[in-house]
Image (cartoon, rainbow, N blue to C red):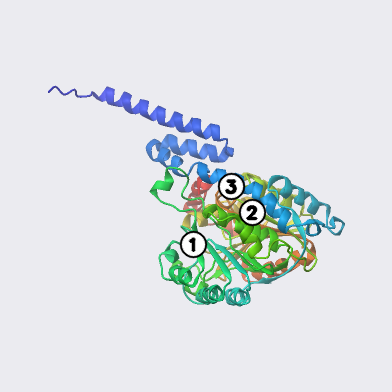
Amino acid sequence: MNWYILTALEVSVILTTVHVLVVGGIAFRVVMQKPAIGVALSWLVTVAVFPAFGAVLYLLVGERRVGQRRAMRIAERRADNVWLATMGIHGRLREVDWSRHRREARAMHEVGMRLVGVPTVSGSTGELVSTAEEILRGIAADVDGATCSVLMEFYIWHAGGLADVVVAALERAARRGVACRVLVDAIGSRPWLKGDQPRRLRAAGVQVRAAFPAGLWHTLFARNDLRLHRKIVVIDDRIAWTGSMNLVDPCHFKQEANVGQWIDAMARIEGAAIAPLAMTVIGDWTLESDEAIEPIVQQAGLDVVEQQGNGDVQVIPSGPAESDDGLLQMLLTLIHSAHEELVLTTPYFIPDESLMRALRGAAARGVEVHLIVPQKVDSILAHYASRSYFEELMHVGVRVHLYHGGLLHTKSITVDRRLAMFGTVNLDMRSLWLNYEVSLFLYGESVAGPLRALQYKYMLECHVLDMAVWQRRPLWNKMLENVLRLASPLL
């Protein structure tokens, strides 16, 4: 047998050809996907410098691939949403008196309607709960009062402490005949799904499902890092909970991360806003099951939700193949509407260019802008990448507050104490483009005011960054921050 040995020149030509084909092929895909320019350039540089690794990484996480079957089901769900809106969000709930609000509130409503398709509902009341013990005991007490249905979805469910009180309440509810459905993210709640509690819940009659299953087989058809990041509880047609807190007891969760306890807030809601929140949970549930929507709606008594209170709320669900840039447009509209004051809290601050421009523009036109972020977070990459933006913001007058009472996990924005956003969305690329989130847009001082009061409470546990001191941090810090900022579109 004759063996042909390649010369060094031939090997070089082959490798160069493969490199050009790989880079060219990925570049073609990037260009045709039309992502944000910063995202596109980050991927092109990554693939050009590390062709094999970069190409594999791009094919794994470079596109918002939800899978053909799921994309079709999401499209079908849009039609179901219209039916649900007709059933639960009837005419009276949609009769908002916009004369009570600033002109910008009506504009925000129109953006949400046209880009996401969910209307503002009138007639809600609620309570902002800001301690984990009150939240977990409150959810458990409401589950104990359920007569027909309990719908829950969470990104993370973690056993231990007061979280187990909610599990026990679900078991009791299911055994007395209440239809209980629990949907958790397959990655965020993986340890819990492998534990004993899901088996106990199913034995009691609770339906437990995992959303967005992940694994090697799924990687062939969809991204594994598209996650269900929502936190919603709907009990009968009477009560809903939503906000930033996972179903965890902070005293038993991520203690090894050395960031302190996680600090969260949840809204306990009654009235009209229950309908679109229930619509969101039911839609997510039907994506993971073969159940029809109508029986779930009727079982929960959600066909006619009654008004309670005078709060006007717009529920905005977002995610790949679901809302495109609807959430981002809502956030930009909210920021641009500020005249006097803009306050933001977020655990992870890695904004896209449009959000940075909006924040800087608000400060430059004289708005008092406060950004509240935790001093420590559980991600080293996010920690350094976020800090690369601080000097740019402080230069135009934004006051950056570092919270030192734990990992501040509350996601909120208030504008002039009259408009607000509260929910699950972080001000980072992942929440804006990859995660399935839910946000409440609140219109009027009666609903935005309590959130502003909570933000003020957070400020009391912060120190404000001083520009001169910040500029004197070590050069290696600045270099690391700026390098990771270049990668921020990929984080």
Query: Residue at (51%, 40%) from the top-left corner?
Result: 42
Give SS at disc 1. Answer: loop
Query: Residue at (82%, 57%) from the top-left corner?
Result: 96
- Is mark 3 in CB contact (under 8 Å) with mark 2? no
Query: Residue at (87%, 56%) from the top-left corner?
Result: 99
Q: Nearer the viewer, residue 179 or 27?
A: 179
Give the mark toward the camera: 3 or 1: 3
- Is mark 3 in CB contact (under 8 Å) with mark 1? no
Which amino acid type is marked by label 2?
Pro
Callout 2: few (<14), some (14-19), or many (20+) C-alpha neighbours within 10 Å?
many
Q: Residue furthest right?
A: 99
Q: Which residue is mark 3?
A: 74
Where is residue 374? Give x, y as percent: 57, 64
Give SS at disc 3. Answer: helix
Which amino acid type is marked by label 1?
Asp
Q: Which residue is mark 2?
A: 317
Question: Is residue 378 visible to us here?
Answer: yes
Give the mark toward the camera: 3 or 2: 3
Give the CA distance from mark 1 to mark 2. 26 Å
Q: Which residue is mark 1?
A: 378
Residue 15: name its quadrant. Answer: top left
Closer to the chain start, of discs 1 and 2, is 2
Query: Residue at (14%, 22%) from the top-left corner?
Result: 2
Which mark is on residue 476?
Answer: none
Give the CA distance from mark 3 to mark 1. 32 Å
Number of numbered discs on residues = 3
Give SS at disc 2. Answer: strand
Side (left or right) of 240 relative to 436: right
Where is residue 170? Give x, y as percent: 54, 73
Q: Nearer the viewer, residue 257 or 131?
A: 131
Where is residue 213? Give x, y as percent: 46, 53
Closer to the chain start, of discs 3 and 1, is 3
